[in-house]
Image: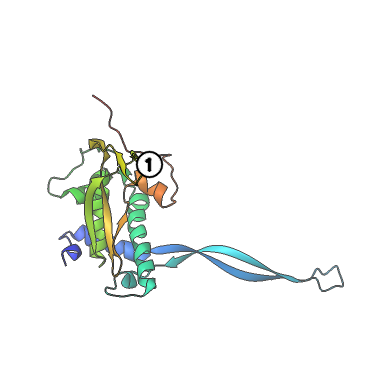
């Protein structure tokens, strides 16, 4: 039950409702088209071709939130919904990644997540992961906020057995979202644009390397 607790924010509830109303996924569909005869010839030269098109299919939020189900479609819809929430924050709301957000527009009466979504629209992994977690819970999906490190300097240190080692520094600290799938467990999702665009095939307009940590400038 802990990972289903929602916030008391009316704004978060309204945001979840807006995402639910337009949640969709792109699918590739095939169809056959008959190319008619050439009227200038006497032969029957009609033929059939198979074409493909990309269509937007509504995502089933209700199915995504079903608990204790073994239907694979529940997992598919839940995954789609998680991506829709992250895409909405990045694309529709225009929230951007930065380790030095402009705080001049912060409202002291609001908490950090609401200020991020309503006022600054700038933040780093903490803000993105927190926002996605709260919205998913509002939609009925069990989710949790997790902090840890991105260990990207790991090397094999022994040829005789599979022993690996490396360095983890302060700037490798990171936060992400984990979503519960019944019968599977907690599945990690990247919510920060700096990494999300590279991991899930979105358009990486910033040209960032999703495997590279953000190293702060030395003072």
| Front residue of 52 and 170 | 170
| Front residue of 151 and 103 | 151
User: Residue drawn at (30%, 56%), measured in percent from left and top?
Assistant: 188
User: Residue drawn at (23%, 47%), measured in percent from left and top?
Assistant: 148
Task: Give the quarter of the image for residue 30.
Answer: bottom right
The x and y percentages for residue 71 are 36, 75
Q: Is residue 109 left or right of residue 136?
A: left
- Which color mode does the image show? rainbow
| Front residue of 202 and 102 | 202
- The residue indicated by pointer 1 is 159
Secondary element at tag 1: loop
201 to 215, vertically: above or below:
below
Residue extending furthest toward the left? 109
24 to 206, vertically: above or below:
below
- Indicate the quadrant containing the C terminus: top left, top right, bottom left or bottom right: top left
The x and y percentages for residue 138 are 23, 64
Q: Is residue 180 visible?
A: yes
User: Residue drawn at (86%, 69%), measured in percent from left and top?
Assistant: 41
Q: Is residue 100 visible?
A: no
The x and y percentages for residue 105 are 21, 41
Q: Is residue 204 left or right of residue 102?
A: right
Number of residues whose C-alpha sits closer than 10 Å to that of mark 1, classed few (under 14), some (14–19) or many (20 or more): few
- Indicate the quadrant containing the N terminus: top left, top right, bottom left or bottom right: bottom left
């Amino acid at each position: 039950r802990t990972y289903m607790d929602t916030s008391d924010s009316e704004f978060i509830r309204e945001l979840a409702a807006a995402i639910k109303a337009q949640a969709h996924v792109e699918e590739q569909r095939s169809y056959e088209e008959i190319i008619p005869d050439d009227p200038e010839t006497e032969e029957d030269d009609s033929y059939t071709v198979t074409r493909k098109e990309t269509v937007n299919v509504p995502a089933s939020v209700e199915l995504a939130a079903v608990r204790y189900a073994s239907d694979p479609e529940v997992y598919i819809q839940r995954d789609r919904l998680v991506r829709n929430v992250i895409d909405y924050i990045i694309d529709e709301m225009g929230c951007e990644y930065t380790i030095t957000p402009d705080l001049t527009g912060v409202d002291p009466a609001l908490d950090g997540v609401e200020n991020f979504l309503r006022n600054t629209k700038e933040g780093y992994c903490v803000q993105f992961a927190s926002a996605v977690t709260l919205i998913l819970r509002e939609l009925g999906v069990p989710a949790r906020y997790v902090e840890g490190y991105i260990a990207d300097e790991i090397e094999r240190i022994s040829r005789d057995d599979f022993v690996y080692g490396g360095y983890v520094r302060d700037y490798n600290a990171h936060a992400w979202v984990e979503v519960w799938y019944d019968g599977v467990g907690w599945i990690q999702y990247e919510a920060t644009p700096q990494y999300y665009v590279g991991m899930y095939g979105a358009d990486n307009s910033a040209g960032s390397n999703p495997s590279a940590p953000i190293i702060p400038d030395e003072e």
